[in-house]
Amino acid sequence: MKKRLLRHGPAVALGIGAGIAAAVLFSLLFRATFLAAALASLSPLPIMIATLGYGGFAGATSVASAMLTIAGLFNAQQKFGSLDTAALGGLVFTFSLGLPAFWLSLLSVLSRPKGSPNWVVTSRVGSFFAREYVSLERILSYAASICATIGVAIAVYVSSLYGGFDVALERLSAEVTPIVERLISPNMHLPNDFDARHLARATVLAAAPTVAGCSLIMLMLNLWLAGRVAQLSAQLPRPWPDIAGELRLQQVYLLVFGAAAGIGPFFGGLPGHIVVIVAVTVGVAFALVGLAVAHYLSRGSPFRIPLLILIYLGLVVPVTWLAFLLLLVLTGIIETAFSLRDRKDKTASPKL
């Protein structure tokens, strides 16, 4: 017992600190400012750093520490009315951000000797030997599945809270309409037969798919940042992957996306909304693949830097972000169907 405490004690202590940091970042979300929201989106980062750099014990401890800290902060700040609802806040963080962050970062450091069926957490000593690591394709697939599940859970919970999907849609649209009316300027011209009420309804319908898609981007970005932090501190127990060359999706996702995007708009009620959530999440995953393709195919090109700057600027400018996102989705779909990167490699390799 004493040896076990001495062995895992530092990792547990670090995990507790990482969990507290994650909880503090997450609590900033309720300040309702852009800077606070940006910092809150980094709340999975301490958990991922702890898991990537110090192993599963540190990661699991950080999730538990974050859950308890968030519940304590919510109760102390009286954001909710009782201890039960404060505990619920801790559980919401755990299942929506904490556990996904822990699982994705744990996947990233799993490896096995070539030919072995057993996956283990890679140690820094083991990283010096030839090992097979969990592919980025598998990590992205898990991330997309998790985020789609989060979006579906939100839709199901809100529907049950209001007694049905249609009732929830009408009530939430009525609550959002005054806010939309205040945001619409007198000089803004809406299409015919499209008023603030219709815009509020569209906003409510877009909420769960947007949360699912943004959660996927947020988790993957935090995983990249955590990996870089662990690498710079010499704590990353695996070689840095070639993200531009290895990030991809299986071709089965073409069928999933095509079916969901094709039939989703024709379904009504909660089932149709769930299909749309799946389509949006898989579409964002294809966009991430498309971004990786843009990085890979532009290697060696004199226009690489201007092209990448144009893409990233286009994604953050409010007027152009949707067009650039759809272009990346299309690129990801084409890559998954026709393997553009593999074709480039075959063309570039010398013929014997």
Image (cartoon, rainbow, N blue to C red):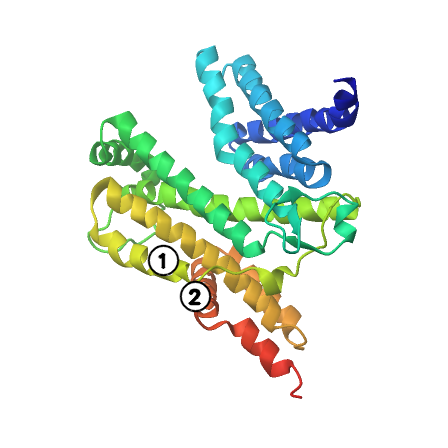
- In front of the other: 200 or 167: 167
How many numbered circles does the render carry? 2
Q: Residue at x 20, y 46 (%)?
A: 268
Secondary structure found at label 2: helix
Q: Quadrant of residue 192?
A: bottom left
Q: Are marks 1 and 2 in contact (CB under 8 Å)?
A: yes
Q: Which quarter shows the N terminus?
A: top right
Residue 340 as seen in the image, left or right of residue 172: right
Relative height, residue 2 to residue 239 (above, below): above
Residue 116 horizontal side relative to residue 216, left or right: right
Q: What's the residue at 25%, 31% (across, down)? A: 171
Q: Is residue 181 visible?
A: yes
Answer whether residue 175 is visible to the viewer in this image: no
Question: How far from the left and from the top, in percent, is residue 122?
Answer: 70, 44
Q: Give residue 104's quadrant in the image.
A: top right
Question: Which residue shows up at 45% across the image and 13% down it?
Answer: 84
Residue 177: image x %, image y %?
29, 37
Residue type indicated by callout 1: Phe
* Residue at mark 1 to residue at mark 2: CA–CA distance: 9 Å
Judging depth in this view, the residue of 130 and 297 nearest the camera is: 130
In depth, the one of 222 and 247 nearer the eye is: 247
Residue shown at 54% from the left, 77% from the top: 343
Residue 203 position in % (x across, y down): 33, 43
Q: Which residue is mark 1?
A: 257
What amino acid is found at the position of numbered circle 2 in the picture? Ile
Residue 82: x %, y % from top left:
45, 11
Q: Characterize the local packing of mark 1: few (<14), some (14-19) or many (20 or more) Cα atoms within 10 angstroms.
A: many
- Check disc 1 and report its element: helix, strand or loop: helix
Residue receiving disc 2? 333
Query: Extreme top residue here?
Result: 82
Q: Nearer the N terminus, badge 1 or badge 2?
A: 1
| Quadrant, the C terminus | bottom right
